[in-house]
């Protein structure tokens, strides 16, 4: 049984991951990518959305659930290959990545070459339809352009986060990011965890 506020948990540089799914709570959602997992409800709703759009061939997952050790590997590898500034811009510090909750997915257009850190997920066509329908299925674009001062993460058109319904629809209709949504309603559970012990990211 998940904690009631699990799907709304805030994960950002000030709020490390407090709840991680166990292995039996993780599921694949895309038949072509059985190794990419999400928390079960998130997986079911994303599969339903892709099914509705008939988009399994055009929209592919790049990265879903990551254990903390994998986030550390991605961080270390990105720092080594592309430098600390780039890593700070696009990779969350280990312990503070939404991917560690199983509620986040990076999606890409199905093309021969896909960038693992910054995949291309266009705004038009089926990708635009995906974005418009996502909130009805509980998914939001987590790091929109123009909200960087609040999220403190660069715009990431490929990173989607499951918060469930009706929250995703309200967030989308009101143009809010999760930080604003949780701060605006004291009745909603804000996961105020301890500050990360070390490290900062942009
Ligand atoms: Zn991501």
Image (cartoon, helix red, strand yellow):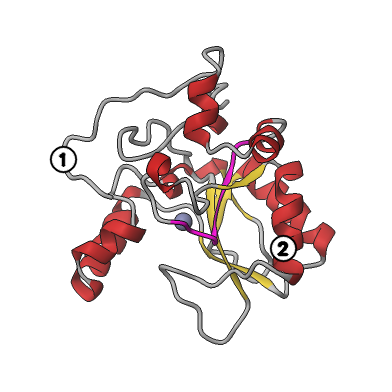
User: Does 140 sit left or right of 94 as displayed?
Assistant: right
Give the extent of the magenta segment.
Answer: 155-163
- Dot 1 falls on a residue whose secondary structure is loop
- Camera-nearest residue between 198 and 73: 198
Quickly name the residue at label 2.
Answer: 128
In the image, residue 111 lies at what x, y percent?
A: 60, 83
Residue 73 in view (yes/no):
no
Q: Is residue 93 above or below residue 73?
A: above
| Image point (41%, 48%), residue name | 148
| Image point (63%, 36%), residue name | 171
| Image point (43%, 37%), residue name | 20
Give yes or no for residue 156 being in the magenta stretch: yes
Give yes or no for residue 43 being in the magenta stretch: no
Question: Residue 198: which disc?
Answer: 1
User: Does 70 sit left or right of 178 as displayed?
Assistant: left
Q: Residue furthest top?
A: 187
Residue 154 in view (yes/no):
yes
| Image point (70%, 74%), residue name | 58
- How would you rate the neighbour count of disc 1 (Cα within 10 Å): few for under 14, some for 14-19, many for 20 or more? few
In the image, residue 85 lies at what x, y percent?
A: 22, 63
């Amino acid at each position: 049984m998940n904690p009631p506020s699990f799907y709304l948990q805030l994960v950002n540089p000030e709020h490390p991951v407090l709840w991680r799914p166990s292995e039996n709570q993780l599921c694949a959602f895309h038949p072509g990518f059985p190794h990419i997992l999400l928390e079960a409800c998130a997986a079911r709703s994303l599969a339903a959305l892709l099914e509705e759009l008939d988009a399994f061939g055009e929209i592919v997952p790049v990265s879903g659930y990551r254990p903390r050790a994998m986030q550390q590997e991605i961080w270390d590898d990105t720092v080594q290959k592309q430098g600390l500034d780039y890593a700070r811009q696009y990779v969350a510090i280990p312990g503070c990545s939404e991917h560690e909750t199983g509620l986040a997915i990076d999606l890409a257009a199905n093309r021969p070459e896909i960038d693992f850190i910054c995949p291309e997920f266009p705004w038009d066509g089926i990708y635009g339809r995906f974005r418009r329908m996502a909130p009805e299925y509980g998914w939001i674009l987590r790091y929109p352009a123009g909200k960087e001062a609040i999220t403190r993460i660069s715009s990431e058109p490929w990173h989607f986060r499951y918060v469930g319904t009706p929250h995703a629809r309200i967030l989308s209709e009101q143009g809010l990011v999760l930080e604003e949504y949780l701060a605006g309603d004291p009745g909603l559970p804000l996961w105020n965890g301890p500050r990360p012990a070390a490290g900062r990211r942009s």
